[in-house]
Image: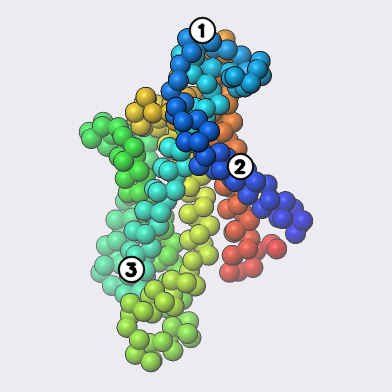
Amino acid sequence: MTGFKSFEFVAGLVLVALIGGAVLLSPVLFPEGGRAMDLTARLAAPFQGWEHPLGTDPLGRDILARVVVGGKVSFFVGIVSALGAVVIGTVVGLFAGYYRGPWDMFLMRFADIQLALPFILLAMTVIAIIGPGLDRIILLMIVAQWVQYARLIRGSVLSLRQAEFVQAAQSYGLPNRKILFGHILPNAMGPLVILATLNVANNILLESSLTFLGLGIDPLVPSWGGMLADGRNYIQTAPWVTVFPGLAIMLTVLGLNLLGDWLRDRLDPLGATK
């Protein structure tokens, strides 16, 4: 089991490092941003030469360039939205679990109501009102996901607030702020890191899905979801237009999930399988 977990970590790290490294180097590798068109090479098949190794799309744009450049959007949305939800959810969960009382009841009931709303329905309603856009997608994901972190942190705080080291800090007269952020939060970080890692993968899928449905970012900006939408009419005649961005999404999400599973086993305070 230990060997399998080591393989799981290495496989996840390699996948994320390779794809993330290529995305970070995209301005150097493809300075034209994947927008260069070659109408004489429309729908060129992959593996026919080094000029377009993964083929081209209906406008003659290089698939490899667009996959690599399009990853910037997916990674940016996934990471920023997860971090935003972590910050808001952690603060709310810390104060709700530590102070309890009416604020805890109000916040948790509000969280229950929000969890009952299907994300896709919420996304369609909000985007129909305010319009699509990268910043709006990120804000929507933060609003939809902070609840998960708030409930997770609140549960950890409820158990940790009775721990001896917290009672000792209280007896020394330490301010509540220092107890919360200096003693309780560090001991509740394990599950938080795991959930954030898995949510980055989930947010990449959500962004791709919304963009595929026309509810995401500007179609002119290269993105994995947009590439899938562009190629759906060519799935039988030129499947590579959708296959390669789909593979990029799958491998990225797989790598992040493998890392998340490894972190869960390493950080599980109850002693998960080592």
What amino acid is found at the position of numbered circle 3 in the picture? Ala
What amino acid is found at the position of numbered circle 1 in the picture? Thr
Q: Secondary structure at mark 1?
A: helix
Instruction: Name the image quarter holding residue 210.
Output: top left
Instruction: Name the image quarter holding residue 147.
Output: bottom left
Q: Quick one: quadrant of the N terminus? A: bottom right
Dot 2 or dot 3: first in sequence order is: 2
Where does the image place residue 50, in percent across and percent down from the top left? 63, 21
What amino acid is found at the position of numbered circle 2 in the picture? Leu
Visible residue check, residue 115: no
Residue that badge 2 annotates:
18
CA distance separating discs 3 and 1:
62 Å
Instruction: Name the image quarter holding residue 93.
Output: bottom left
Residue most toward the bottom?
A: 172
Residue that badge 3 annotates:
96
Q: Residue at horizontal 33%, vertical 68%?
A: 96
Q: Nearer the viewer, mark 2 or mark 3?
A: 2
Q: Secondary structure at mark 3?
A: helix
> In this picture, is 7 found above or below 22?
below
CA distance separating discs 2 and 3:
40 Å
Residue that badge 1 annotates:
40
Dot 1 or dot 2: first in sequence order is: 2
